[in-house]
Image (tube, helix red, strand yellow):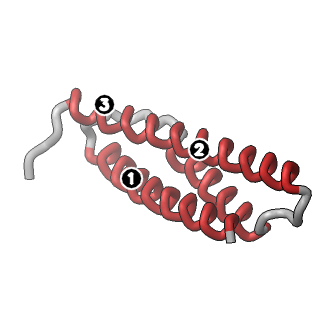
Amino acid sequence: SRKETKETAFQKQAEIKSNAHGLISASFAMGILLTVIRNSNNDKAHSQEGAQILMISLMMCIAFLLPFFTKEADSYEANIVRTGQESVFHMSIGLFMAGMFVSWT
């Protein structure tokens, strides 16, 4: 298989970090919106399970996607870590969406 160039590897690392920041921001915004909607309607709180799922999604991003990896971006180790981070990111997106649906039901 063909080895990545350094530029491509750096771009992929930056893309993962950028996507993680977007998901973290969306999680905080979702939490704030749920709080505002709950307070404005004066009805029962939204699903606690949904909030827990959103928190797990947020924690996955913080724990696995934001830490800085010190190896060369085009090294074998960095490629393995980046592949794992992409998998965690996709799971985080799925949990974020599930948390939203559970919160609204």
Query: Pointers 1 and 3 in contact (CB under 8 A)?
Result: no
Which of the marked residues, 2 or 3, is nearer the chain's N terminus?
Answer: 3
Callout 2, which amino acid?
Ala
Residue 84, quarter of picture: bottom left
Residue 85 place in picture, x, y as percent: 43, 51
The CA span between labels 1 and 2 is 18 Å
The CA span between labels 1 and 3 is 14 Å
* Residue name at image x 60 percent, y 39 percent: 25
Residue with the mark numbered 3: 10
Residue 66 as seen in the image, left or right of residue 77: right
Residue 100 place in picture, x, y as percent: 62, 61
Q: Nearer the viewer, residue 89 or 100?
A: 100
Quadrant location, the C terminus: bottom right
Residue 41, quarter of picture: bottom right
Callout 1, which amino acid?
Glu
Badge 2 marks a residue whose secondary structure is helix
The CA span between labels 2 and 3 is 24 Å
Residue 92 place in picture, x, y as percent: 52, 58
Q: Which mark is residue 86?
A: 1
Q: Nearer the viewer, residue 9 or 98?
A: 98
Say above or below: 75 vs 47.
above
